[in-house]
Image (tube, rainbow, N blue to C red):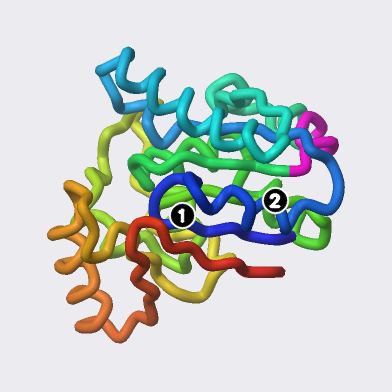
């Protein structure tokens, strides 16, 4: 599996993501990290921009709401078998982690590691791959409880072995909190990578 990990959105880096594609051009777009949003118009505009970025590199995109698969991981896995790209929006990493757990996507992604599928996304979509979610609570609210009275999951998926700090020194409203997040990693001897908006890294598993 290949991982295209961005600080913020896809934008002009679309051609770099396209280079990773080797099979199906079918993609799913997951925006559950934004389920906390109450501004529906702004949310829809956000989704449209993300989806358009993917379509511009030739992908056939369908939005996938993980809430439709809570408690039905087998059906979700079957659906994703023929999908080439799993693209996930930024937002709240703790909400995304719970949604992945309840739908089984966390385990499904690990099952797909030996395939040629691409996992792509930005901000929270990358943070959730880290070994731990400790430190991300400096930026994101950890107890929204959008999906019921579930305990906060502090364990990341552990697919990358470093903490991700997006929006570093960038024109983003979370940028100042990212400096505090990095200070936490340094204090606790946690390896990390800080990316400015517009930057990305590629990982292969």
Disc 2 is placed on an element classified as helix
Q: Which numbered disc flags the more N-terminal residue, 2 or 1?
A: 2
Q: Camera-side residue: 142 or 49?
A: 49
Disc 2 target residue: 18
Q: Camera-side residue: 166 or 199?
A: 199
**Magenta stretch: residue 72 in it?**
no
Residue at 84 percent of width and 36 percent of height:
82
Q: Which callout, 2 or 1, points to the residue nearer the camera?
A: 2
Q: Camera-side residue: 178 or 185?
A: 178
| Magenta highlight range | 78-84
Residue at 61 percent of width and 26 percent of height:
64
Q: Is residue 84 left or right of residue 180?
A: right
Question: From what the image shows, is residue 90 above or below residue 21?
Answer: above
Image quadrant containing the C terminus: bottom right
Residue at 34 percent of width and 71 percent of height:
194
Question: From what the image shows, is residue 143 above or below residue 110?
Answer: above
Identify the disc placed on residue 128. Answer: 1
Disc 1 is placed on an element classified as loop
């Amino acid at each position: 599996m290949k991982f295209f990990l961005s600080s913020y959105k896809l934008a002009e880096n679309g051609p770099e993501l396209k280079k990773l594609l080797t099979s199906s051009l079918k993609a799913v777009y997951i925006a559950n990290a934004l389920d906390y949003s109450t501004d529906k118009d702004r949310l829809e505009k956000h989704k449209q921009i993300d989806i358009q970025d993917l379509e511009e590199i030739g992908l056939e995109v369908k939005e996938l709401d993980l809430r439709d698969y809570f408690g039905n991981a087998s059906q979700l896995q079957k659906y994703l078998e023929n999908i080439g790209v799993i693209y996930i929006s930024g937002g709240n990493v703790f909400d995304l982690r719970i949604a992945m757990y309840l739908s089984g996507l966390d385990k499904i992604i690990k099952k797909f590691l030996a395939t040629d599928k691409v996992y792509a996304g930005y901000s929270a979509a990358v943070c959730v791959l880290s070994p731990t979610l400790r430190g991300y609570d400096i930026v994101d609210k950890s107890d929204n409880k959008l999906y019921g009275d579930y305990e906060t999951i502090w364990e990341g998926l552990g697919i990358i072995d470093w903490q991700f700090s997006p929006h570093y020194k960038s024109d983003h409203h979370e940028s100042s909190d990212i400096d505090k997040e990095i200070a936490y990693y340094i204090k606790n001897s946690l390896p990390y990578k800080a990316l400015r908006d517009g930057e990305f890294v590629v990982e292969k598993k």
